[in-house]
Each structure stands twice: as C-alpha cells, then as structure tokens.
Image (tube, grey):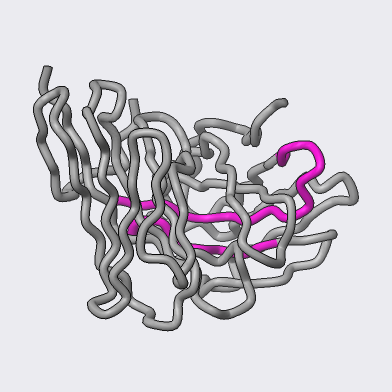
C-alpha cells in the first residue's frame, strides 16, 4: 500500500511569508503527527491530529498550526516565516493514537527560508 | 541528497562486522523505545521497538538492548552491510498518553566501509 506522501518536497520562501505543507497518511491511518528536523535541534514534535482534532502539541510558537480533514489528510501552516524555520518537516501516520504504535514517516518537505 | 546528520557523531565499521549504536534516554518513566534509521533524502524508517518491561528484543539482524538502571538503549546490527549506512535515531515515548509524541535522540551516523 502507498506510504505517507508529503507535498511539496522542496520549497523556498522569504522571511515574513507563510507556507502550507500537506500530508496524506497511509490509508486507514487516522493519526497524523508532524515533526521538525534541523541539524541543531534534531527531530522535534510539533503536533498530532486524530479524527480531525489536535490531540497533542509540542513546544512551538503559535505561528505553527495544523489541521486534519475528514479523510485524515493533514496540513500544517507556518506564518510569518523566520530564518530559523528552515528545516525538514516530517509527517508521520499511525493506525491508532492509543497503545504502542509505529509511526510511519513520509520523506518530508524541505523548507528553506531566505 | 539532503544531509540531516551534520555534526552528528559517526560510527565507522567494516562491512561484515557487527555494529553497536548506543543511546542515552532522558525520561526514566518512558515505557516504549524505538530505533529509527534515516537514509539521505528519506524520512525515518522504523527498525525495531522495545517496551520497558523487556531488556532485549531481536529482529532480523538487529537486536535492541534496554538497560533501565542507567537509562541506556543500544542497537546491535549483525553482519553490517553497505545498505545499513544511514543516520540512526533512538526515540522514547514518555508516559504522557500521547504515543505519537516521541522524543528523539540527536542521531548517530553509521558509515560502512567496503
């Protein structure tokens, strides 16, 4: 079955702009979580959505937001971009939000802020 | 390809040798641990997991060891192959009830010499 699909794979923005990233989870997976990956901070949890509701949130400013649609597809948005937002944004899906589960990651969206 | 492993510690091993990748985790209450592998240009890929009530788990060519006394996790790869070259991350699932909110280690680059 198809894996987690993220679009776009690469994008370049300038400071102050906003960006929307998209994630299509594995079919049947209802939980979608987002991570930011940078060389300095590594992988950091942004938020998780389950059945269109944000269930968990990491320690990121309010400029970072997300949503999930009824088909489990998710988007994340970053407003008023800063240079430090340059990162690889990873989406992961899993089949349940309770009990141990395996996160399956997409290839990521590489954002460069100039 | 992308480099998400800048400034990460590197383990260099000879093809065919066994590799041991170590990780110190932070939360003594974490109840679930996972190893991920990330190749250039890809998202993290699940390798193996272990629950806190176990101290060893084996998979195909991989073994994970958990030492809760010193909060240490290790990944052993038998007969290391060139395809094992990647960045390896350990992750822990703190007991927050949020199974998608993983805390990742900084990562270790495994380089396999032919």
Answer above or below: position of B27 versus A29: below
Q: Position of residue B57 (x, y in %)?
A: 40, 53
Q: Give left or right: position of B107 versus A74.
A: left
Q: Is residue A33 magenta?
A: yes
Answer above or below: position of A72 versus B28: above
Q: Residue at x 58, y 50 (%)?
A: A103
Q: Position of residue B84 (x, y in %)?
A: 29, 29
Residues B2 and B74: in front is B74
Quadrant the N terminus of chain A occupies: top right
Instruction: Give the main secondary structure of the magenta stretch.
Output: strand
Q: Give left or right: position of A104 versus B60.
A: right
Please report the bounds of the magenta region as a residue range: A24-48
**Residue B86 occupies quadrant:** top left
Q: Give left or right: position of A2 versus B2.
A: right
Residues A42 and B39: in front is B39
Residues A43 and A114: in front is A43
Q: Give left or right: position of A99 versus B76.
A: right
């Amino acid at each position: 079955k198809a894996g987690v699909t993220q679009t776009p794979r690469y994008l370049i923005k300038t400071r102050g702009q906003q960006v929307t990233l998209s994630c299509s989870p594995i079919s049947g997976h209802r939980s979608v979580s987002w991570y930011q990956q940078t060389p300095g901070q590594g992988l950091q949890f942004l938020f998780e959505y389950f059945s269109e509701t944000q269930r968990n949130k990491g320690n990121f400013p309010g400029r970072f937001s997300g949503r999930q649609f009824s088909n489990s597809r998710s988007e994340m948005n970053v407003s008023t971009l800063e240079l430090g937002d340059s990162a690889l944004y990873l989406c992961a899906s899993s089949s349940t939000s309770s009990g141990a589960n395996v996160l399956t990651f997409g290839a990521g969206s590489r954002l460069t802020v100039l | 390809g992308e480099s998400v492993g800048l400034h990460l510690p590197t383990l260099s091993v000879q093809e065919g040798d066994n590799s041991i990748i170590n990780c110190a985790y932070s939360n003594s209450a974490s109840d679930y641990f996972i190893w991920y592998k990330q190749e250039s240009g890809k998202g993290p890929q699940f390798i193996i997991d272990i629950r806190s009530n176990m101290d060893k788990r084996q998979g195909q060519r991989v073994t994970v060891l958990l030492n809760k006394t010193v909060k240490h996790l290790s990944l052993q790869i038998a007969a290391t192959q060139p395809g094992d070259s990647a960045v390896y991350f350990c992750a822990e699932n703190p007991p927050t009830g949020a199974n998608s909110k993983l805390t990742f280690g900084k990562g270790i680059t495994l380089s396999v010499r032919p």
